[in-house]
Image (tube, rainbow, N blue to C red):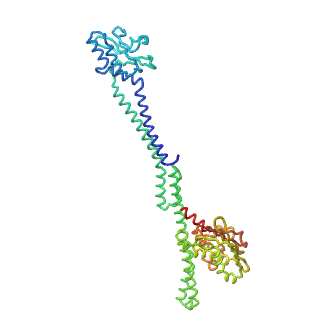
Amino acid sequence: MNRLWVRLSLAFTAVVLLGFGAVVFGTFSLASNQRMQTLLLNQFERPHGLVDSASAYYKEHGSWNGVETLMDGARSTLLPGSGARGALILLNADGRVVYSSLPPERLPPTSSRVGRPILADGKLIGHINFIALQDNKPTTYAAWDTSSPSDFMQEVTLFLLKIALAVGVLGLLFGVLASRNLAAPLNRLAVAARAIGARNLDYRVPVQGSTEIREVAESFNKMAANLQSAESLRRNLLADVAHELRTPLTVLQGNLQAILEDVYPLDKGEVVRLHDQTRHLHRLVNDLHELAQAEARQLPLQTQTLDLNALVREAVDFFGPVAEEESVTLELVTTAVALPIQGDRARLMQVLQNLLNNSLRHTPAEGKIEIAVRPQAGGVEIAIEDTGEGISAEDLPHIFERFYRSGKARDRDSGGTGLGLAIVRALVDAHDGRVTVESDGKGTGSQFTIWLPTEAASDSRSDSF
């Protein structure tokens, strides 16, 4: 019932019913006994009407003898059919009934007291009466106006004009109300569009109106929210880039200035330090570019069928020597069953390397990192659990945010760029997966869990689009 086409249909139906009701009202009003009596009496009194015809008949014949022919013809013309609306009575000058379309026993007793006088050369020669009937029984004599006869057609025309005017006014009011009701949500959308165009991204449209308008309003609000989120990301990115680039650029500028002023000698060791800063800048810019592409869902993926067991084993083998050097135990737990997925090999390897590198950086010597691969709810799960520093409850909700470091006291060299886990989440999202982290607090270690859809689940999702 809240569909726009239903509301429009109901509005048009209401207008049609309004017009139909006006026609019915006008018809019944014009066809009422009072109106019909007025019409008949008007026909009696008009020039060459029944009164004039009766007067001419009397002048011609000198009496009312044979007047039945004239009266029967008038009755059949003015009261067609059975004449159920009324009866005609003709009286002579003495008040005696000389013609009646009713039997004598059904005549009212006061027939001589009412009627339209018939004159011939200024002399009263009789009266003509009209009796209203209801259920074929006499009720009342017609109220006869002895003044000049009214123009019935003028009355009818005026009556119809009044009805037309009333219907027009009602139709106009109804149309205005219906139009305002239907157009109000669109006006609100237009105001909201202008507000968004003016960079007021906090503006939202009230979700009101028909189902279609509500869907448009909800889509508009979602679009505004996405724009607001994108604008927030853009501002945060600019702030983060400016903040992160400031340190290496300051170091470069200061060292180069010192070399120019002969404070530092231009030797190989100084060049190595400057080169390290440029590498840090290069890595930071590449990470930001990759993260921006992934968050915008524009990162190109070279998807293929992969055996996740083999991929994880390769990543663990790569970090084996590093873990051995740090005296950290790496343990891999997999299944004998192949776990095929659809994904980009290089990107998923990057995800695994970032997570393993993060765990190794925060796991002390003699610690342990366990990597488990297992089927889980329509996909496959990779769990990386370590016995490292752990994550506080305060830091846990922000661990995947860009440039966020759980150890605020750690410097940037030991803490990395702060983009590794943000890139992990973006790349996992690009594969229609999800990544979560759990930790009971500082000193309890942490567990990162990745869920990726299996090859069959990926195919079924692709078929559904």
Q: Nearer the viewer, residue 309 or 390?
A: 309
Rendered image quadrant of residue 172: top left
| Residue at screen point 49% across, 60% down | 196
In the rendered structure, the answer to whether residue 110 lies left or right of residue 209 reads left
- Give the answer, above or below, for where 9 lies relative to 74: below
Q: Is residue 40 above or below residue 184?
A: above
Residue 173 x/y as whole percent: 44, 41
**Where is residue 57 drawn, in percent x and y?**
28, 14
Vertical position of residue 286 compared to residue 51: above or below = below
Q: Position of residue 353 (x, y in %)?
A: 62, 77
Q: Is residue 129 left or right of residue 348?
A: left
Q: In the image, residue 83 lies at what x, y percent?
A: 40, 20
Toward the front, the furthest residue is 337
The foreground one among 428 and 464 is 464
Q: Give the answer, above or below, for where 104 lies relative to 288.
A: above
Front one among 226 and 133:
133
Number of numbered discs present? 0
